[in-house]
Amino acid sequence: MAGSNWLPRWFYQLASPRWCYDITGKLLPGFLIAAVLLLVAGLVWALAFAPPDYQQGNSFRIMYIHVPSAILAQSCYMLMAIAGAVGLIWKIKVADMVAFACAPIGASIAVMALATGAIWGKPTWGSWWVWDARLTSMLILLFLYMGVMALYAAMDNETTAAKAASVLSLVGLVNIPIIKYSVEWWNTLHQPATFTLTEKPAMPVEMWLPLLVMVLGFYCFFGVSLMLRLRNEIIRRERRSGWVRELITSR
Amino acid sequence: MAELCTNSAEISLGQLFSAVLKRDLLLSFRRKSDLVNPLIFFLMVATLFPLGVSPEPTFLADVAPGVVWVAALLATLLSLDGIFRSDYDDGTLEQVILSPQPLMVVCLAKVMAHWMTTGLPLALMSPLLGVMLFLPMSAMFGLVVSLLIGTFVLSLIGAIGAGLTVGLKRGGVLISLLVLPLYIPVLIFGSGAVQAAVAGLPLAGYLALLGAMLALGIVLAPLAISAAVRISVTG
Amino acid sequence: MQFETISEFIKMDGHGLYVWLSYAIGVSILIGNLILPLFTRKELIKNLARRLRRENNAQ
């Protein structure tokens, strides 16, 4: 890294488990406060103050929780694959732990996107499940998460499991655009595009502003959850090192 | 594997590829049951549908493209574990990794051998299933060609899963979990091609897309396969 | 405020069940994602502390 000082120092320090533990410990309260504030404000705004949709009425309010979770589930996969690649290429242990911590969060958020999507489908389409392109690709994303988690669970050796899961999530990352387009094309072949849930021609400000707040809140929340899991992972894998022993005994 | 142990200067990539291919084909022809089992499975799965759903010809003709494709996909899945398993168990894979020859070429040759022993016979046998499921004769060409291209992609993607799980005792179920979601685009375009053939629509677009996936797979999958095998064997 | 009364807010023009069900699922998944790592952390630290004590006693 000599000569390249365009990245701040703390960025390199993140690669050390101990520093990463300290830095995330300092960042956690801020993220937690931001997440709680944004989510509570967003929830109240979305539930009580946002205007109802002229077509869907109040069931439209599900969007404020469905869309952020769908966005987050996808970006979480991206982060998992990128962290896996970083761990694979530069052999940074913390990156492996980040990838490991991403998998269960992403899977649960994907479940949330699917569940809210299905519930939203009932008043809009009249059935709980529609083979809509977005729902189907979200289901496949959940399958990809489950594959990664099954691979982690099947391997005893942590380093091997991390490498194998990184390869799998990278293969998945290459495949995601292909899956997305193939599912969209398959969908247009099988049923005419009846109704798009999220692509409103021009959403008024009072409708998309709460959505923006919710999306930001979800990202902050993701940061909190990721850091909590990451810190657990750091303690677990570094349990033999001196600083973790000190940390445990000092409590 | 005598050919592989020679000095790297003496063997070209093409020779390496054909040596591995020849060896794997020879090995699988010595174990005939492994060769025949996926075919029997393919036939049986396709038999289950008329029994389980309805023997009505019009209905069967409707679902035939999907059924044949899903059956071929499952038959490929069943045989995936065998790509690296015996080589891993007897230590050959370790020797291959230690050898100076590029692992990627060896992996590609092994996948090619796997396709020639499963995908190729499956595609050649598919008209039989097509007839059983009342698929119109005009769609047979589309069925065979889409399976020929598609099963190679399935073998390439599946080999990644096989490589990742070869070090595990019970890799069988895990492979399907890892690989099935990645199979979906191939299934969509493969059965789409057959459906287009049934409807009398031009096939070229679907086959071109399958071909594009094959090209992408041949370029990228060996990278992932060799990385996976290396991780499994050295880990 | 889009709603006049509390009962209107709960009913949401007949879509209340769907809206509240999806928000309940969403919020419970969010809270679960916070509680679960906290529990794991507690458990982990307890186990590690026990192990440390055992090691110290053995020496």
Image (tube, coloured by chain):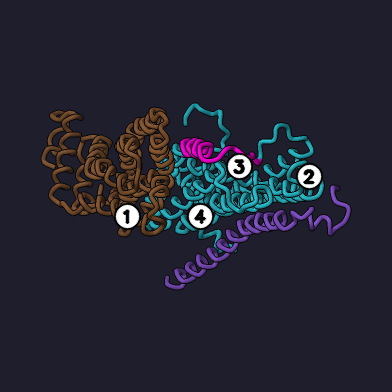
Q: CA distance from mark 2 to mark 1?
A: 52 Å
Q: Position of residue B140 (x, y in %)?
A: 31, 38
Q: CA distance from mark 3 to mark 1?
A: 42 Å
Q: Which residue is mark 4?
A: A233
Q: Which residue is mark 2?
A: A52
Q: Quadrant of residue A7?
A: top right
Q: CA distance from mark 3 to mark 4?
A: 25 Å
Q: Are marks 3 and 1 on the same chain?
A: no
Q: Which is closer to the viewer, label 2 or label 1?
A: 1
Q: Which mark is residue B47?
A: 1
Chain identifier matching the brown colour in the rendered picture: B
In the displayed orientation, state which residue is furthest to the front. B57
Query: In the image, what residue type sits under mark 3?
Result: Ile
Instruction: Identify which residue, A20 or A57, lies in the foreground.
Output: A57
Q: Is residue B7 visible?
A: yes
Q: Quadrant of the N terminus of chain B?
A: top left
Q: CA distance from mark 1 to mark 4?
A: 49 Å
Query: In the image, what residue type sits under mark 1?
Result: Thr
Tell me the magenta residue range: A176-197
Chain identifier matching the cyan colour in the rendered picture: A
Residue at 32% x, 59% y: name it.
Answer: B170
Q: Main SS type for the magenta part? A: helix
Q: Secondary structure at mark 1?
A: helix
Q: CA distance from mark 2 to mark 4?
A: 44 Å
Decide: few, some or many residues near mark 2? Use Cα within 10 Å; few <14, some 14-19, many ≥20: some
Q: Which is closer to the viewer, label 1 or label 4?
A: 1
